[in-house]
Amino acid sequence: MTTNSMYWRGALAGIALALAGAYGITEWNAVRPAHAAATEAAAAQAAPQVMMPDFSQLAEKVDPTVVLVETKREIAARDDMPVPMPVPPGTDPRGPERGEGQAAGSGFIVSSDGYVLTNAHVVAGATEVNVTLDDGREFKGKVVGIDKRTDVGLLKLDAKDLPVAKIGDPQKSKVGSWVAAIGAPFGLDHTLTAGIISAKSRTLPGDSFVPFIQTDVAVNPGNSGGPLLNLNGEVIGINSQIFSRTGGYMGLSFAIPIDVAMKVKDELQTHGMVKRGRIGVAIQDVSKELASAFNMPRPEGALVSSVEKGTPAANAGIVAGDVIVAVDGKPITKAVDASRLIGAMKPGQTAKIALLREGQSKELSMVLAETPGDQLVAAAAAPESAPPKLGVMVRALTPEEQQRMGQESGVVVEQVAGAAARAGIAKGDIILAINNKPVTNANDLKRLVDSAGERAAILIERDGARRYVAVKFS
């Protein structure tokens, strides 16, 4: 480099520093080449713009329709329950202690003449219900009815000209959409929390009527019965349950879709109870493994694991192993779809059930019966043999068990390991069939397992309920 070029480069750098000092950084940027500024502006414009929602208008709009529900009740004895599990927010998963207590939940007004929706578990067994509005007015709440299967409760206030929550369409909501909850966590009424829809149509253990909306909205004790809202301030669900080890929020909240709740509300308001149709079957989802065992192209439909004697399903000819694929022309993807569609029909209605049986399509018609109470619970009690391929030690049913179950076939699992244990078969389970072939004794079990190939669909009975288990032997 020559002396002159070094001199000019140093001189230019000095001028640049002087200009930066004289004009400041903003002024110095102004004298940069136009194309550089344009390039940076275009890059900034192309960068993704993250817009966070503003919930302030939503809160102002909806708050007047949300109420605090306080109850007094006799509390049942505590029992031991497994965790984590879906429980109402604030519920000790072990169960409550005996005594008299107070509890608080939430609700929202659905008619100007004083009807309020909440959770069934908020008001069930209450000896007294007090409802406080956003403006401070207090009312005695009358429990019109509760439906424990959907966890929906309906209250009536002696009031008129009340503000009413706007009901939305949960079917239009999408996973990833922003949602908000308003309720009274820990008694802090009209608290707003927000998050997103994490999943839709969730089926929780022990439930078969509600396709829950899963969110990550913070839901805690006192939120039960409050509304889940979209950004338009429309109610799309009722906050009902959480997965928790402690009874507090752990990131998984579940809401009853409002379309399900409003149908229940209409029934409670008209009849004080919900009348549901039934056909008399126990059903379960079709997993990939079960679909393979039944030679089905896809894991869809509701697999019938048992049929009650004398019910519409039994009279129409439905048998265990049938897969329900449609109810009145509406397709069935999961077992909850069949439960919900049949349960939404009235006793006495005729239902058309489309099903698959050993790969063949069938359609059966039957008049629905009325849904009864809960099922019975089965029992257990010297081992016989252990098919090594399956990994179970079994014994025959006792005469008492045969009488209680109303059947003579089946074997009781006494010890379990290997393939059976991996598939979830447990001690006390009663094995009834292998690939829809009945098991009458231990020899039948061994023969059917040995001829089953690499996998089998095993029908078991546990605690009075029957279901298929897909077992992979290799």
Image: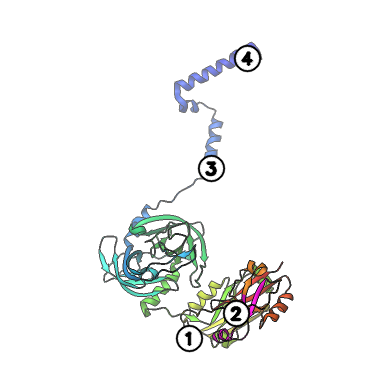
Give the CA separation, mark 1 to mark 4. Answer: 101 Å
Percent position (x, y) of residue 458? 65, 75
Q: Which residue is mark 3?
A: 47
Magenta span of residues: 391-413
Q: Which disc number belongs to residue 214? A: none
Give the CA separation, mark 1 to mark 3. Answer: 61 Å
Asked if marks 4 and 2 touch (Cβ < 8 Å), the reply is: no
| Amino acid found under the numbered disc labelled 2 | Ala
Q: Earlier in the sequence, mark 2 or mark 3?
A: 3
Above or below — where is 165 with respect to 10?
A: below
Q: Which residue is at 33% across, 59% downward? A: 187
Percent position (x, y) of residue 462? 56, 76
Q: Earlier in the sequence, mark 1 or mark 3?
A: 3
Q: Which residue is mark 1?
A: 348
Q: Which residue is at 51% across, 72% downward? A: 208
The quarter of the image holding the N terminus is top right
Give the CA separation, mark 4 to mark 2. Answer: 90 Å
Give the CA separation, mark 3 to mark 4. Answer: 41 Å
| Amino acid found under the numbered disc labelled 1 | Gly
Q: Earlier in the sequence, mark 3 or mark 4?
A: 4
Q: Earlier in the sequence, mark 2 or mark 1?
A: 1
**Is 334 left, or right, of 150 in this rendering?**
right
Q: Secondary structure at mark 1?
A: loop
Give the CA separation, mark 2 to mark 1. Answer: 19 Å
Percent position (x, y) of residue 177? 48, 57
Q: Nearer the viewer, residue 264 or 7?
A: 264
Q: Which residue is mark 4?
A: 5
Q: Is residue 300 magenta?
A: no
